[in-house]
Image: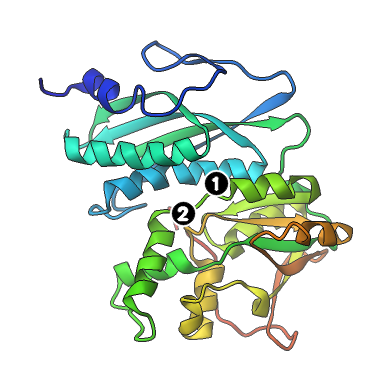
């Protein structure tokens, strides 16, 4: 029997993710009905990915399914929330069962890792577009916010920065430095197409963190959101910016430009009170201190000698309408 809108949902999505006890009504009714614990608030975020803007038309549908959910899970991590439920609105140019099967597999594999259930959504015909709304639970009064950075807080980031930007630049242009091997490109491309939301790190740093954001548009742009809403500035030590072994092979100035201004890293940037630094670093997480919060509302980049850097950053992050 040929697929239609309703058989598509039933075949690929209705039972794709594991069931949670706090879901009273899920796919198959007009609305999902969910039960929220009395001691928790709900954190909600929505992201839309558009073919040709957020991903290449020829991307592997498995990795696209993964990334479509990962970007929302990264938002939950930035708020200190644990994943609970999500909805999916999928616009397809045509019904391709092989594509749908791989997309659903990539999405549900990541959903299973983080115990988040698909509880509803919609399917329509048109240019390939994926919108996912995630819902997470956060204990009352413990959510992380951008606006809570304090003077003298230390600034941390998770993982390494700039990998996704380097992979994107290769796809968009002829840039292909000879220092990078095929294995390097495989690593960088995976960082672009299958980012890892830092939910485990988020839960561990939660008691010690003042402000947080996920790095989706570039470190300078996203840290800038923390600084703007907190009324503060930052000093960043360029020598402390964490770079992957692959990016360490290329020109350092170019690598730093990727790390500071390219998006799609989906790492965390967060601030910690100076007297909590020892406690945070005792957790032995994949994090790196890169600077501190200052009163003057600007970002000062310092070179390896502690002097203001002359690094030329022409872009401070991705802007859809710039």
The image's colour scheme reads: rainbow
The residue at which mark 2 appears reads as 195
Taking depth in this image into account, of 196 and 177 the one nearest to the observer is 196
Q: Earlier in the sequence, mark 1 or mark 2?
A: 1
Give x and y (percent) for residue 104: 32, 36
- Secondary structure under the numbered disc 2 in the rendered image: loop
Q: Report the number of numbered marks.
A: 2
Query: In the displayed image of the protein, which residue is found farthest to the bottom?
Result: 305
Residue in view at x 11 percent, y 23 percent = 2
Which residue is labeled 1 in the image? 74
The answer to whether marks 1 and 2 mark residues whose Cβ atoms lie closer than 8 Å is: yes
Is 69 rendered above or below residue 244? above
Does residue 204 sit above or below 93 in this rendering? below
Residue 79: x and y in percent read 66, 42
- Residue at position x 43%, y 35% from top? 132
Q: Is residue 207 left or right of residue 33?
A: right
Q: At x 47% / y 16%, what residue is drawn?
A: 32
Residue 117 visible somewhere in the drawing: yes
**Of the pair 223 and 81, the residue shown nearer to us:** 81
Residue occupying the point 57% across, 44% down? 75
């Amino acid at each position: 029997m040929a697929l239609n809108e309703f058989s598509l949902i039933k075949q690929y999505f209705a039972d794709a993710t594991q069931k949670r006890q706090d879901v009273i009504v899920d796919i198959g009714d007009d609305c999902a009905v969910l039960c929220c614990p009395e001691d928790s608030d709900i954190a909600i975020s929505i992201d839309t990915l558009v073919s040709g803007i957020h991903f290449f038309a020829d991307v592997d549908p498995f990795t696209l399914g993964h990334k479509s959910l990962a970007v929302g899970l990264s938002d939950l991590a930035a708020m200190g929330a644990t994943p609970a439920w999500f909805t999916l609105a999928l616009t397809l140019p045509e019904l391709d069962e092989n594509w749908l099967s791989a997309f659903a597999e990539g999405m549900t594999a990541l959903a299973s890792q983080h115990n988040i259930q698909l509880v509803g959504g919609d399917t329509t015909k048109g240019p390939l577009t994926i919108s996912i709304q995630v819902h997470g639970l956060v204990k009352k009064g413990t959510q992380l916010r951008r606006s809570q950075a304090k003077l003298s807080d230390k600034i941390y980031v998770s993982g390494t920065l700039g990998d996704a930007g380097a992979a994107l630049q290769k796809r968009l242009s002829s840039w292909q430095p000879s220092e990078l091997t095929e294995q390097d490109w495989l690593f960088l491309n995976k960082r672009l197409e299958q980012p890892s939301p830092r939910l485990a790190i988020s839960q561990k740093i939660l008691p010690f963190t003042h402000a947080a954001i996920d790095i989706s548009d570039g470190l300078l742009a996203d840290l800038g959101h923390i600084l703007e809403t907190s009324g503060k500035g930052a000093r960043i030590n360029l020598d402390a910016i964490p770079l992957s072994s692959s990016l360490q092979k290329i020109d350092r100035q170019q690598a730093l430009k990727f790390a500071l201004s390219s998006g799609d890293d989906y790492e965390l940037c967060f601030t910690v009170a100076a007297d909590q630094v020892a406690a945070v670093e005792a957790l032995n997480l994949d994090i790196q201190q890169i600077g501190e919060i200052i009163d003057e509302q600007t970002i000062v980049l310092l070179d390896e000698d502690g002097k203001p850097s002359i690094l030329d950053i022409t872009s401070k992050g991705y802007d859809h309408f710039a």
